[in-house]
């Protein structure tokens, strides 16, 4: 080494590789790509999100502090921008990055609702039926089954070819992981609940109950509206 030279300038070589933010971020990305997001702890997910809004800084302490202050990852992700900006070390940019997650989740939920609407009240059911009229084959006393999950989200809307085949309805419910059923019968003329409707619903309820599958209602649809067996006290 030349006398008088600055030892720190000797090729900028250091005895150990950097353990600063850049090296840490590289290792985090490697873990993410190798094991997927499920391999990351909650604070690590938040840490990676903060990479985008806080460059050239170790974001692990910020992520851990935010979760400790708010309570959990979900609370941080759902927090208003005004709350995020007040967290220690957070910047307006990092708050905007965190808000991206909530916006993306909301848009995903809207897309899912378009494909699998939630039919948890009469207005939503009526709107769905108006937008999805039955095929011609069901317009003469055919049976239509709506298969729902535990949130009343639609999993399937199917014609039951053999109206008396209770076992087939239950098999389809199991295949779709449905926890509830809604039966619809299209009747010609003014809708009326027939004895056959009551008997069919009773058989299906008994078979479905064994597997903890509920039958919400049996509606008879026709000119001028519908008739609900449940509202009539028939189920």
Image (spheres, rainbow, N blue to C red):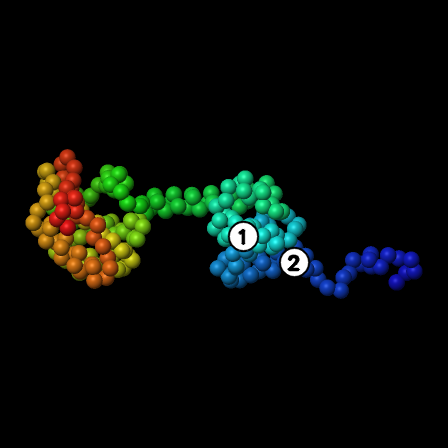
Outermost residue toward the bottom in this view: 15
Q: Quadrant of residue 124?
A: top left
Q: How far from the left and from the top, in percent, is residue 75? A: 49, 49
Q: How far from the left and from the top, in percent, is residue 87? A: 58, 46
Compare residues 91 and 185 and report the one nearer the observer: 91
Q: Looking at the figure, which quarter contains the N terminus?
A: bottom right
Q: Residue at x 71, y 62 (%)?
A: 17
Q: Residues within 10 Å of mark 1 (few under 14, many from 20)?
A: some
Which residue is label 1 attached to? 67
Q: CA distance from mark 1 to mark 2?
A: 23 Å
Q: Image check: 175 left or right of 162?
A: right
Q: Image check: 27 left or right of 109?
A: right
Q: Earlier in the sequence, mark 1 or mark 2?
A: 2
Q: How far from the left and from the top, in percent, is residue 73? A: 50, 52
Which residue is label 2 attached to? 23
Q: Residues within 10 Å of mark 2 (few under 14, many from 20)?
A: few
Q: Residue at x 52, y 59 (%)?
A: 40
Q: Are circles 1 and 2 on residues that touch, CB within 8 Å?
A: no
How many callouts does the rendering have?
2
Outermost residue toward the right in this view: 3
Q: Residue at x 14, y 42 (%)?
A: 227
In this orientation, does residue 204 appear?
A: yes
Label ID, residue 108? none
């Amino acid at each position: 080494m030349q006398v008088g030279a600055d030892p720190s300038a000797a090729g900028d070589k250091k005895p150990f590789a950097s353990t600063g933010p850049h090296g840490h971020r590289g290792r985090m990305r490697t873990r993410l790509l190798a094991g997927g997001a499920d391999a990351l702890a909650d604070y690590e997910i938040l840490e990676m999100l903060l990479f985008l809004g806080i460059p050239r800084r170790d974001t692990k302490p910020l992520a851990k502090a935010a979760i400790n202050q708010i309570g959990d990852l979900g609370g941080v992700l759902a927090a208003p921008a005004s709350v995020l900006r007040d967290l220690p070390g957070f910047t307006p940019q990092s708050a905007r990055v965190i808000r991206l997650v909530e916006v993306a989740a909301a848009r995903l939920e809207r897309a899912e609702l378009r494909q699998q609407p939630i039919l948890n009240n009469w207005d939503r059911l009526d709107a769905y039926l108006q937008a999805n009229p039955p095929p011609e084959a069901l317009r003469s006393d055919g049976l239509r089954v709506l298969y729902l999950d535990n949130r009343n989200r639609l999993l399937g809307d199917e014609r039951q070819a053999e109206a008396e085949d209770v076992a087939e309805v239950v098999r389809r419910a199991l295949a779709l992981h449905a926890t509830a059923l809604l039966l619809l019968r299209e009747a010609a003329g003014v809708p009326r609940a027939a004895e056959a409707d009551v008997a069919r619903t009773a058989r299906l309820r008994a078979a479905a109950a064994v597997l903890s599958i509920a039958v919400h209602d049996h509606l008879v649809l026709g000119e001028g509206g519908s008739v609900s067996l449940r509202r009539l006290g028939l189920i």
